Image (cartoon, helix red, strand yellow):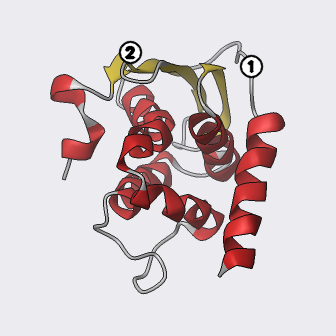
Amino acid sequence: MADLRSLYQEVILDHNKNPRNFGELEGASHHAHGDNPLCGDSYDISVLLGEDGTIEDIRFSGSGCAISKSAASMMTHRVKGKKAEYAEVLVDEFRQMLVGELDPEAEDNELGHLKVFLGVAGRPERIKCAVLPWHTLRAALRGKEVVSTEGDADPLAES
């Protein structure tokens, strides 16, 4: 188990140091800005959605902790080239995994390598860091320009 945790930490640290799909996306069709005011994480997610609903390109920019940056990097890598509906499923499953509503090892899911964030579920103070990019992606796909992890927009209150 210690080796698996070490591997997970290496993956998260690699995405933090070498974020994929980082930077501005010119010609984006969808965009949202997300903040986690409690810890200062702040990201913009830009999406180029094709006419058939495929995420043709996606990029993120902003700053935050290693957990939020690696979550954004892995999220963009995972949903690029996929349908928006599939991304919505991942948003739900990722959130459910972190709040303990989904056991990704025992229940059917699409999470794949995103399970590296399962260790975050045991650290409530970091859950919103990991969820922020996903919450912001959902907002972008739904045409909402600004979201927060607090107040009425708290992604952990979603069901």
Residue that carries the numbered disc 1 in the rendered image: 23
Residue 93 vs 88, above or below: the answer is below
Location of residue 8 by image quarter = bottom right
Point 81% across, 36% down: residue = 17
Earlier in the chain: of badge 2 and badge 1, it is 1
Is residue 104 or residue 79 the one in the foreground?
104
The reply to whether residue 111 is visible in this rendering is: yes
Q: Residue furthest front?
A: 2
Q: Position of residue 127 (x, y in %)?
A: 41, 46
Residue that carries the numbered disc 2 in the rendered image: 145
Q: Position of residue 148 (x, y in %)?
A: 33, 23
Q: Secondary structure at mark 2?
A: loop
Is residue 107 or residue 81 the one in the foreground?
107
Point 56% across, 36% down: residue = 68
Q: Secondary structure at mark 1?
A: loop
Residue 151 vs 121, above or below: the answer is above
Image quadrant occupied by the N terminus: bottom right
